[in-house]
Image (cartoon, grey):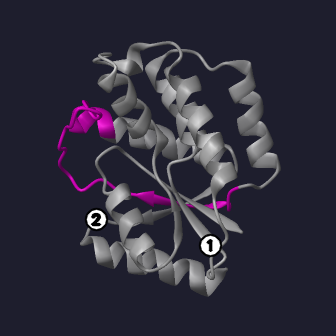
């Protein structure tokens, strides 16, 4: 199975693209951070990202989802962010990265669990905050730059997906994976 990552700044449309890919029959793995935030907020924790265990909780869910994925006729899978993104999030939040997560990222990179081509979904130029996403556009763009720097430093090639309608972005990604797989 070839696993491709959709990454980029918050609010860029990654999840919408993921759903479009799912509609085309591709196997997808939804973003774990949003699920963890929703779960914690349902328990009355207003800003779970302030907890030092936040990154560890996301990685646990991502590992579970990675194990539960199914094969599909395309032999391709798309991830709305990855454990590497969670590693970057931990850096951004300043929580420090637990050694086991550092080791896991190293293992994922060496083991080529994910394809080296990463789809960097560029910002739409505006930000819609939600209960799970409370960040300014400027902060989101800076966070996106950090993703691009870290992925590149880890040996990935970021393919930029420019802002335009969701279906056009999804078709571009499908064309790129189907012509260069």
Evaluate whether residue 150 shows in this view.
no
**Residue at (72% x, 69% y) in the render:** 1
Q: Nearer the viewer, mark 1 or mark 2?
A: 1
- In percent of width and height, residue 72 lies at 63, 75
Residue closest to the eye, 19 or 68: 68
Can you identify the residue that label 1 sits on? 76
Q: Is residue 68 left or right of residue 11?
A: right
Residue 150: image quadrant is: top right
**Residue at (24% x, 72% y) in the render:** 165
Q: Is residue 36 left or right of residue 122?
A: right
- In percent of width and height, residue 133 lies at 28, 35
The vertical placement of 168 against 54, above or below, is below
Is 41 covered by the magenta stretch? no
The vertical placement of 39 against 122, above or below, is above
Pointer 1 local density, CA inside 10 Å: few below 14, some 14–19, many at least 20: some
Residue 59: image quadrant is: top right
Q: Is residue 2 left or right of residue 138?
A: right
Residue closest to the eye, 143 or 26: 26
Q: CA distance from mark 1 to mark 2?
A: 23 Å
| Figure disc tally | 2
Q: Looking at the image, is mark 1 or mark 2 earlier in the sequence? A: 1
Furthest-bottom residue in this view = 179
Residue 139: image quadrant is: top left
Evaluate whether residue 134 shows in this view.
yes
Residue closest to the eye, 177 or 45: 45
Label for residue 163? 2
**SS category of the residue bearing label 1:** strand
**SS category of the residue bearing label 2:** loop
Point out the image quarter for the C terminus: bottom right
Magenta span of residues: 114-140
- In percent of width and height, residue 129 lies at 19, 38
């Amino acid at each position: 199975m070839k696993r491709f990552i959709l990454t980029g700044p918050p609010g860029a449309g990654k999840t919408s693209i993921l759903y479009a890919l799912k509609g085309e029959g591709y196997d997808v793995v939804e973003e774990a951070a949003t699920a963890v935030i929703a779960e914690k907020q349902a328990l009355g924790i207003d800003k779970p990202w302030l907890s030092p265990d936040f990154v560890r909780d996301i990685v646990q869910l991502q590992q579970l989802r990675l194990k539960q994925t199914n094969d599909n006729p395309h032999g391709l899978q798309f991830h709305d962010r990855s454990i590497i993104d969670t590693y970057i999030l931990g850096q951004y939040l300043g929580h420090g990265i637990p050694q086991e997560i550092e080791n896991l990222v190293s293992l994922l990179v060496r083991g080529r669990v994910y394809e080296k081509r990463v789809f960097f979904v560029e910002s739409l130029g505006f930000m819609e905050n939600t209960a799970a996403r409370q960040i300014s556009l400027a902060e989101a763009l800076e966070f996106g730059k950090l993703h691009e720097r870290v992925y590149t430093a880890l040996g990935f090639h970021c393919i930029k997906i420019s802002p335009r309608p969701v279906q056009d972005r999804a078709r571009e990604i499908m064309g790129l994976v189907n012509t260069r797989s």
